Amino acid sequence: MKGQLTLVVPSMAYGDEIEAYRAEFLQPGAGNMNGSGSLQTLSVPEWLTLLKRDGHPDTCRDVPRSQFLCLRPRDGRVVGMVNIRHQLDEGMLHSGGHIGYSIRPSERNKGYGRQQLVLALDKCRDLGIRRALVCCDSDNEASRRIILSCGGVMEDIRARSDGKPVMRFWIALQGPPSQQGDGEDKDNKLSPGQAGS
Ligand SMILES: CC(C)(COP(=O)(O)OP(=O)(O)OC[C@H]1O[C@@H](n2cnc3c(N)ncnc32)[C@H](O)[C@@H]1OP(=O)(O)O)[C@@H](O)C(=O)NCCC(=O)NCCS
C-alpha cells in the first residue's frame, strides 16, 4: 500500500481530473467533498486563484491553508483531496480541525483514505504542527477508523453549529521540527488540556 499515492499541489495540469473529482460528488450518497476548499462552488481557475490567496498569511480569509490533490501516479488519477489549516481559529478548534479530506466515491474502501491521512500528517509535521486535531461526524465510521489507525486519541464530542455531534481526536506528531520555523509549537494557541467547553 505504501507509496501508491502522493500529494501534489493543484494546478491546471490536473484540470480534467479535478473536474472529474467534483462530478463524482454530485451523485447521490457521495457525501461531502471535504478537504477541497470551495471547489464545489467555483470554476477550477477561480479555485486555483483562491487557493493561492488562502495559502498566504497576508491574504488568507481566516488562517493559512495548504491544498493538496492525492494523486495515484500509476495512472495520474486524483483519488482524494486534503486541505490543511496551518493554525486553528476558534471554530476549527471547536469542530473543524487541522485537516479536511475526502476520497472520490469510485475509489473508496481501498485503504486510500488511511494512506492519504498518513501523507497529510507528514505535511503537518513539515509545517511544524506537533499535535494535529482531526474531527469527524460521530456517524462517520470510515473516518473514525482512519483517524484511530493513525494514532488519534479522542478528547471529546462537541456539537457543530448545525447541532450534529463531532468527535475530536488529537494525533501526536513525532519527527524532526519544521525546517521552516523555529521548532516552536505552532499547531494551535490552546493545548488539548486548555481547549475549554
Ligand atoms: C471517509 C472517507 C475519506 C473514507 O475513505 P476510504 O478510502 O473509503 O477509507 P479506507 O478505505 O482507508 O477505509 C478506512 C476504514 O474504514 C472502513 N470503511 C470504509 N468504508 C466504510 C463505510 N462506508 N462504513 C464503515 N466503515 C468503512 C474500512 O473497512 C477501513 O477499516 P479498517 O481500517 O478497520 O480496515 C470517504 O468515505 C469519504 O471521502 N467520505 C466523504 C468525505 C468525508 O467523510 N471525509 C471525512 C471527513 S472527517
Image: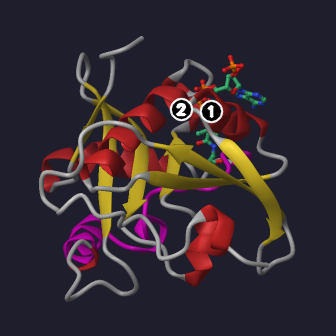
Q: Residue at x 36, y 51 (%)?
A: 19
Quadrant housing the N terminus: top left
Query: Ligand 1: does it lie within 8 Å of the C-beta at label 2?
Result: yes
Residue located farthest toward the top when viewing the structure as drawn: 1
x and y percent of residue 122 in the render? 33, 39
Could you tell me the amino acid type at mark 2? Answer: Gly
**Quarter, ligand 1:** top right
In front of the other: 116 or 17: 116
- Assess disc 1: are there few (<14), some (14-19) or many (≥20) residues with their C-alpha within 10 Å of its C-alpha: some
Distance between mark 2 and mark 1 Cα atoms: 7 Å
Q: Residue at x 67, y 40 (%)?
A: 143
x and y percent of residue 14 in the render? 21, 45
Q: Earlier in the sequence, mark 2 or mark 1?
A: 2
The mark total stands at: 2
Using residue 160 as the reference point, say whether residue 13 is left or right of it.
left
Asked if residue 158 is positioned above or below residue 177 in the image, the reply reads below
Quadrant housing the C terminus: bottom right
Residue 1 part of the magenta-drawn span: no
Q: Which residues are magenta?
A: 28-52
Residue under label 2: 113
Q: Disc 2 vs disc 1: Cβ atoms closer than 8 Å?
A: yes
Residue 51 part of the magenta-drawn span: yes
Residue under label 1: 146
x and y percent of residue 101 in the render? 51, 49
Query: Ligand 1: does it lie within 8 Å of the C-beta at label 1?
Result: yes
Asked if residue 61 is positioned above or below residue 176 in the image, the reply reads below
